[in-house]
Image: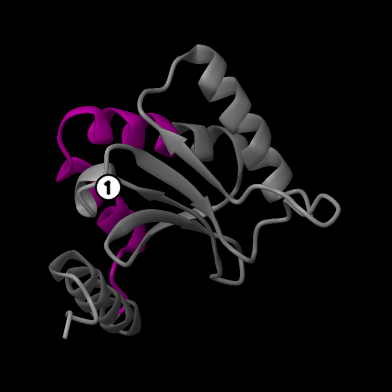
């Protein structure tokens, strides 16, 4: 029988438990986000740093970690968007993943995730627009 969770998924679950405990102890969530980004390498790190800057410039979301990944929460503490590095789950691209708190609803079908292999100025402008929409509601 195959394992229920991969090694990477188990690590993410352990990170979520540690995050909850740290929050209860009053840990600095923004510092944890900075540390998660600093621990990345290569293109994942470059894109995470750029995304982090875009969130800071275009939203009032608070930085934190979510399952060990950089994430950004609304005033109620709900994660709106997270950056998932490709290396975390051994996939060929990073992703920006919007959660239920994001206000991206557009009819019956809308995207909630974007794959990233790099990020140029046009990509940053597009992502900034999506971020603004995600927090507009």
User: Which quadrant: the C terminus?
Assistant: bottom right
Residue at 60% across, 21% down: 125
Q: Main secondary structure of the magenta part?
A: helix
- Is residue 4 visible in the rendered image? The answer is yes
Q: Is residue 48 above or below residue 62?
A: above
Q: Position of residue 65 (x, y in %)?
A: 34, 61
User: Which quadrant: the N terminus?
Assistant: bottom left
Q: Is residue 128 above or below residue 38?
A: above
Name of the residue lying farthest toward the right: 107
Q: Position of residue 15 (x, y in %)?
A: 23, 72
Q: Nearer the viewer, residue 120 or 31?
A: 120
State how many labels appear.
1
Q: Give the side of residue 78 with respect to residue 16, left or right.
A: right
Q: Give the side of residue 36 with respect to residue 114, left or right.
A: left
Q: Which residues are magenta?
A: 26-52
Mark 1 — residue?
34
Q: Position of residue 91 (x, y in %)?
A: 26, 45
Residue at 60% across, 31% down: 128
């Amino acid at each position: 029988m195959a394992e229920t969770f991969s090694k990477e998924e188990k690590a993410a679950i352990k990170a979520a438990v540690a995050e909850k405990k740290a929050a209860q102890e009053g840990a600095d969530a923004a510092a944890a986000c900075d540390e998660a980004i600093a621990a990345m390498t290569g293109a994942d790190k470059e894109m995470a740093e750029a995304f982090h800057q875009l969130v800071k410039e275009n939203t009032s979301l608070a930085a934190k970690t979510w399952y060990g990944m950089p994430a950004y929460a609304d005033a109620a503490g709900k994660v709106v968007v997270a950056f998932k590095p490709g290396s975390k789950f051994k996939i060929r691209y990073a992703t920006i993943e919007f959660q239920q708190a994001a206000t991206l609803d557009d009819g019956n079908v809308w995207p909630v995730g974007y794959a990233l292999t790099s990020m140029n100025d046009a990509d940053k402008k597009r992502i900034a627009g999506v971020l603004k929409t995600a927090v507009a509601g």
